[in-house]
Amino acid sequence: MPALMAPLNLKKPKKETNMSTVSEKQKEFLFPCIANYYEKPLVLTKAKGCTVTDENNQEYLDFFGGILTISLDHCNEEINRAVYEQMNTLGHTSTLYQSEGQVSLAERLSNIAPGDLKKSFFTSSGTEANETAVVLAKVFTKRSEIIVLRHSYAGRSHLALNTAGNAPYRIMDSSIAGIKHAHAPYCYRCPFNKSFPSCDLQCANDLEELIQTETSGHIAAFMAEPILGVGGFIVPPDEYFQVAVGIARNYGGVFICDEVQTGFGRTGKWFGIEHSGVNPEIMTMAKGIANGFSVGATIAKKEVADSLLKPSISTFGGSPITMAAANKTIDIMIEKNIPEIATKKGAIMKSYLEAMHEKFQEVGEVRGRGLMWGLELVKDRKSKTPDQKLVLKVLEEGKKLGILLGKGGLYQNCLRLAPPMLISEVDLKHGCELLEKAFTNALKA
């Protein structure tokens, strides 16, 4: 009888939530590129509703929703129950096998998506969804060149980083050919020094010369976000997409609409592009689709989706567990009419933010829709010099007061606000009051 092997002498990690210990271990065991907010990063231990709690039991009102990912509220009991039931029934299959949850979600998305979007492919993130969309566009059109926007962000894969119009996130030189960056519809910092509407949408019309001079004249796609998220919640004029997409289609391209941040009621409509009246051939989704569970989705018109014939799989795409979360999330959104809630509560938020614009000269612009708002901070309104330091101060003062805020923009001078959409009006108003107080304190700091 063979001798039994001695058990491995494995050291069990101690369960510690001391902030300094966690920070030390993060430096030792995680990539340094994983950036954290705040001079002393928070260690969050639990959350419920619109409140998160740190290791010292300090509560914070979440006004950024895990980067627009907690679409409803934290630890939603209905979603948790659906996930728990699914975990006890069927946990993992991969896309090699069919499952009811995946088909059900695909049907739901077809019913609520704009235009004739019909067939879906599920992955685990917005990055993968955008990768899938670009591949699909190239296969369908049999072309390879794509147009993207400056100030945009599509994820952290090799392709996505090459499409990024935001240098701080481009960790390597451009190395994928056929990607052209058009001027963003950034009215506050118009690249043509004009004002809307007298500008005649020059940023959109410029796509034609870009295609004529920097491509073969035959493109695969134009890919853009309805509101540029990482770019600082830049909101294009509604007419922008009518012109830009029209030009792209004239040169053979399809429109890929990146709804990773704007989707699922966040802007007051199911999808942000609906404000423009333009229907995409391909649309991508993630973040709020499953209220914090990892789901990416690419949906396309039937004739576009049907061009992708070679076998493809997604190991975690279509997972029964994440599909259960997404299906229940959308059930709740439909039941509660989340787009209408975002519109009504967004109007409340807008009134507070516009009052701040009137009160503080350092608020250069307030922009947004629904429950997705940005404040661009400047040293003075005449020069529009970005004030990154003030943003950091506001975040730190907000933390002291018990509110978590987001930031972004090419110059990192924009506050980004996107609370969970089931936030109560009381908490919403309280959060706006805390924001103003944090701003006042930051100016004194």
Image (cartoon, rainbow, N blue to C red):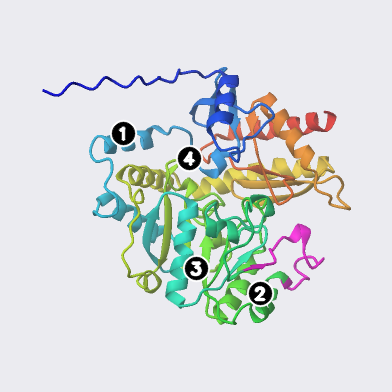
Circle 4 sits in a helix, a strand or a loop, which is it? loop
Mark 3 residue type: Pro
| Mark 4 or mark 2: whose residue is earlier in sequence | 4
> Gap between marks 3 and 4, in whole Å?
26 Å
Question: Residue 122, image x and y in percent?
Answer: 38, 55
Circle 3 sits in a helix, a strand or a loop, which is it? loop
Q: Which residues are magenta?
A: 180-202
> In the rendering, which numbered label is found on residue 72?
4
Q: Residue 92 appears in which quarter of the rendering?
A: top left
Return the residue found at the far front.
2
> Which residue corresponds to mark 1?
84
Using the image, determine if residue 222 lies above or below residue 433: below
> Which residue corresponds to mark 2?
207
Mark 1 residue type: Tyr
| Mark 1 or mark 3: whose residue is earlier in sequence | 1
Quarter holding the C terminus is: top right
